[in-house]
Amino acid sequence: MKKKISYNFMQPSILLTVLFTTLFFGCDQEYKDEIVFSSDDLIEEEEIIIPSDPNKEYVLPNIDLSNWKVTLPIGKPDEIEPPEILKYGTNAKLQPYFYNDSINGALVFYTSPGASTANSSYSRTELREQMDPGSNSTNWTFKEGGRMKGTLSMENISKKSDGDYDKTIIMQIHGRLTNQQRDLIGQKDNNAPPMLKIYWQDGLVRVKTKVLNNLNASSTEILETDAWGNDDGYNFPIEVGFDKFTLEVIVSEGKMEIILNETYSKIYQDIHMEKWGVFENYFKAGNYLGSTDPNAYATVKYYNLTVTH
């Protein structure tokens, strides 16, 4: 019976023999069978161990996915919730769109036009907060408050025919109707408008919020999606381009603040914020591409992301 034998090439006698034979005989097949090892150099059932490069560092992103699900630009669209999302590194469905850059310590969000949700025509690779892992039913109000902070960068993004870059949403606060509110207005789902959208747009961080079209709207009318319109938007005064930057969103009763690089602040504290208090909310973060062009794409990297309530 033949024994299965592996060679320990770390042993000096074997290493010198291999080097000498290679240098003297070259790669000619005629001499390959003449390499001889002594029995002392043979180790049964031992694997060859190749030492790792001590100069190469691998860094993981500082992101706990225990309270997030991710939506993908494929399927109907497909979603991966906790606890499955915690194994994203080995999930074949996720790997093209949601994966680690372990050299730079980032979680990569890649998307291109594909599957979209029921209330949108755009595709995304985007996280959705789940206070109760695996469920969308537990959310928060502005009165209860919340804070989301992340460090991220735009890796690359497609350009439109006019030469401008496409845009993508990198953070959101999305509204949600309670079951009672949903039934009150006869809506088929719990969807409410997004109070906050933060875009990467032509190298700038752009903020869009909702305003109530009719400040005298009744408590029932205010729940309707078309009761809310878009404000004019706000661009932070510095260009982030493709560099790393930090965003923080802080909400409390009747107030919302967005902070860029811990220096530039935009505060919303008005009647519209007060009226918004009727809705539940949840945070979102990732890459929600604002284009349906089949050649469009975007890659966003998150280095850290935290949420507190």
Image (spheres, rainbow, N blue to C red):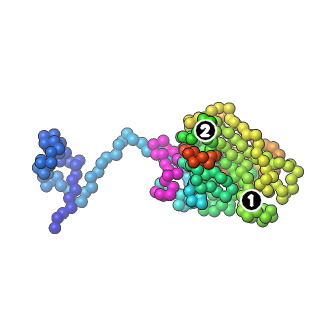
Check disc 1 and report its element: helix, strand or loop. Answer: loop
Q: Is residue 20 visible?
A: no
Where disc 2 sits, the SS reads loop
Q: Is residue 202 left or right of residue 58?
A: right
Picture residue at 83% right of the left edge, 48% below the top: 213
Residue indicated by mark 2: 161
List x then y, in percent, for residue 24.
Answer: 13, 40
The residue at the far right in this view is 216
Residue farthest toward the front in the current orientation of the protein: 161
Residue 151 got which mark?
none
Q: Residue furthest bottom?
A: 1
Q: Quadrant of the N terminus?
A: bottom left
Q: Quadrant of residue 2?
A: bottom left
Q: Would residue 1 appear left or right of 174 to someone viewing this image? A: left
Question: Residue at coordinates 73% horizontally, 64% vertically from top-left?
Answer: 188
- Magenta span of residues: 90-108
What is the CA distance from the residue labelled 2 to the residue labelled 1?
39 Å
Residue 139 higher or lower than 153, as above or below: below
Q: Earlier in the sequence, mark 2 or mark 1?
A: 2
Q: Count how many numbered circles sit on residues in the image.
A: 2
126 and 47: which is toward the camera: 126
Residue 21, horizontal then vertical, whole percent: 14, 43
In the image, 112 versus 65, the foreground residue is 112
Q: Position of residue 75 (x, y in %)?
A: 57, 59
From the viewer's side, name the closer residue of 102 and 262. 102
Residue 26, relative to residue 115: is it above or below?
A: above
Residue 85 visible in rendering: yes
Amino acid carrying mark 1 in the image: Leu
Q: Residue at x 72, y 62 (%)?
A: 189
In reply to whether residue 65 is colored magenta, the answer given is no
From the viewer's side, name the closer residue of 155 and 122.
122
Disc number for residue 177: 1
